[in-house]
Image (tube, rainbow, N blue to C red):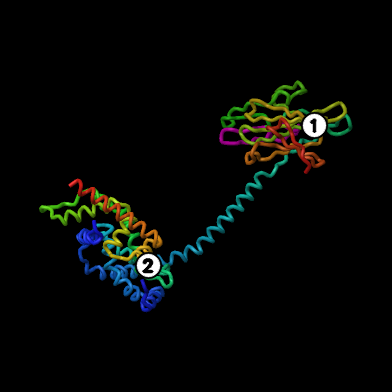
């Protein structure tokens, strides 16, 4: 993804300690970062916390952002790490992963499909869940997924393909049991 | 499942757990500002600088500690000389010879006591206590007193040229000289124990008359050892607690 010169200037300013410049850079990324966190955690409050923490960490580690790099993949990688930590540390996510989601009304086919997809995602490991969320939910291209996961283009493609196949198998298995 | 359907299902499934959060941007900014105000970020950013000067300091302290330890160990294994007592009476060759006596060396100095712990100690070379000095037991080898005159309280009589060194509660070395019709000190034998005096080994080699017992703090060596020094600078090191000796030229 091409980096705008204006953005580069803002990154330099933020690196120099310009807090307003950093907030300007961060603002357009927050919506997608929140969706990514929701896609990984399936809990909007935990997702908000993760984005908040990721923003703080991004400010602290801004000097590590390489010259000429785009901020979005770098920030999304921080968000993904934060979500991984949040999943490990929150007992709540463990409980939620075990308890089936309540469906009070007669289940709509689309709702049931959504529940199944989320359950299938939760059963997969974090790395696969990340590439699936980035590709199928945030609609990011593979080269940007490669930058976020630091896998390289071929590695990101392979992981995405395997994760997608695994997800499809899991969902078919769910549907077969219905 | 087609890619388009999968994408649609993803959006439906995950949008359900990602309600709009219009306040998010304001919350994140407010959180950042609050942390800046409270100094969290500045503290976190300063941490690497602090580590930069703490690490060399720790390294320097470690280096000093290592050097001090080496010096202490070097000092601890320095051999401590226990000279064979000088002769005190006139011998056949006109020299003064030491005599049997109640005090090591035949003089009037008090018997030395060396406590290895609060309860265990050695005294006078061959007396050993294990109850803090209430009772003392003579654990000396019988051959130490070979040729002793028939004096009252014979157990306290020490041979001429007596010397001792106690390393710990179990290891000890003692030496004595033997006279002949022509010399006050004809030869010197060493005795060693590694079991607190229950058994003693007698050095097989008769040392030169002028030898002196030199002992080292063998606890810090790989094997308890003692040295016998000679005036011509040949150092004799015990092997197997004194049974055999190496000869080394200093």
* Percent position of residue B40, x then y: 36, 66
What kind of element bears circle 2? helix
Residue under numbered circle 2: B41
Q: Are marks 1 and 2 in contact (CB under 8 Å)?
A: no
**In which image quadrant can residue A128 be found?**
bottom left
In three-dimensional space, the C-alpha distance between marks 1 and 2, rounded to whole angstroms, equals: 83 Å
Q: Is residue B66 above or below residue B26?
A: above
User: Does residue B40 show up?
Assistant: no
* Percent position of residue B246, x then y: 75, 36
A117 to the left or right of B184:
left
Number of other residues with Cα within 10 Å of mark 1, as a class: few under 14, some 14 to 19, many 20 or more: many
Residue under numbered circle 1: B98
What chain letter is assigned to the residue under label 2? B
What kind of element bears circle 1? loop
Q: Is residue A113 above or below residue B236?
A: below
**Sequence-first tag of 1 and 2:** 2
Number of other residues with Cα within 10 Å of mark 2, as a class: few under 14, some 14 to 19, many 20 or more: some
């Amino acid at each position: 993804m091409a980096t705008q010169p204006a953005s580069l200037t803002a990154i330099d300013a933020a690196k120099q300690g310009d807090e307003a410049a950093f907030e300007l850079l961060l603002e357009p990324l927050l919506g997608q970062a929140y969706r990514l966190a929701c896609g990984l955690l399936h809990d909007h409050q935990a997702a908000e916390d993760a984005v908040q923490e990721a923003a703080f960490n991004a400010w602290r580690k801004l000097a590590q952002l390489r010259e000429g790099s785009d901020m979005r993949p770098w920030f999304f990688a921080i968000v993904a790490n934060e979500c991984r930590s949040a999943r490990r540390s929150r007992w709540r996510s463990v409980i939620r992963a075990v308890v089936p989601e309540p469906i009070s009304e007669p289940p709509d086919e689309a709702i049931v499909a959504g529940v199944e997809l989320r359950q299938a995602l939760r059963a997969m490991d974090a790395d696969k869940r990340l590439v699936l969320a980035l590709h199928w939910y945030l609609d990011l291209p593979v080269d940007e997924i490669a930058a976020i996961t630091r896998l390289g283009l071929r590695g990101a493609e392979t992981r995405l393909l395997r994760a997608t196949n695994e997800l499809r198998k899991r969902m078919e298995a769910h549907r077969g049991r219905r | 499942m087609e890619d388009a359907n999968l994408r649609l299902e993803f959006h439906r499934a995950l949008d359900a757990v990602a309600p709009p959060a219009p306040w998010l941007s304001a919350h994140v900014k407010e959180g950042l500002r609050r942390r800046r105000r409270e100094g969290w970020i500045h503290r976190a950013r300063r941490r690497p600088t602090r580590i930069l000067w703490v690490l060399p300091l720790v390294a320097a302290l470690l280096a000093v500690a290592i050097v001090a330890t080496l010096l202490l160990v070097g000092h601890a294994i320095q051999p401590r000389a226990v000279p064979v007592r000088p002769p005190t009476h006139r011998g056949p060759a006109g020299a003064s010879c030491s005599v049997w006596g109640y005090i090591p060396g035949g003089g009037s100095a008090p018997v030395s006591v060396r406590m290895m712990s609060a309860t265990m100690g050695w005294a006078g070379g061959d007396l050993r206590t294990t109850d803090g000095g209430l009772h003392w037991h003579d654990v000396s080898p019988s051959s130490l007193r070979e040729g002793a005159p028939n004096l009252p309280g014979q157990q306290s009589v020490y041979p001429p040229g007596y010397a001792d060194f106690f390393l710990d509660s179990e290891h000890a070395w003692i030496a004595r000289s033997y006279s002949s019709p022509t010399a006050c000190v004809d030869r010197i034998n060493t005795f060693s124990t590694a079991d607190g005096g229950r058994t003693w080994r007698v050095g097989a080699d008769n040392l030169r008359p002028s030898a002196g017992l030199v002992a080292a703090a063998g606890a810090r060596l790989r094997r308890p050892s003692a040295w016998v020094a000679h005036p011509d600078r040949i150092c004799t090191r015990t092997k197997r607690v004194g049974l055999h000796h190496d000869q080394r030229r200093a």
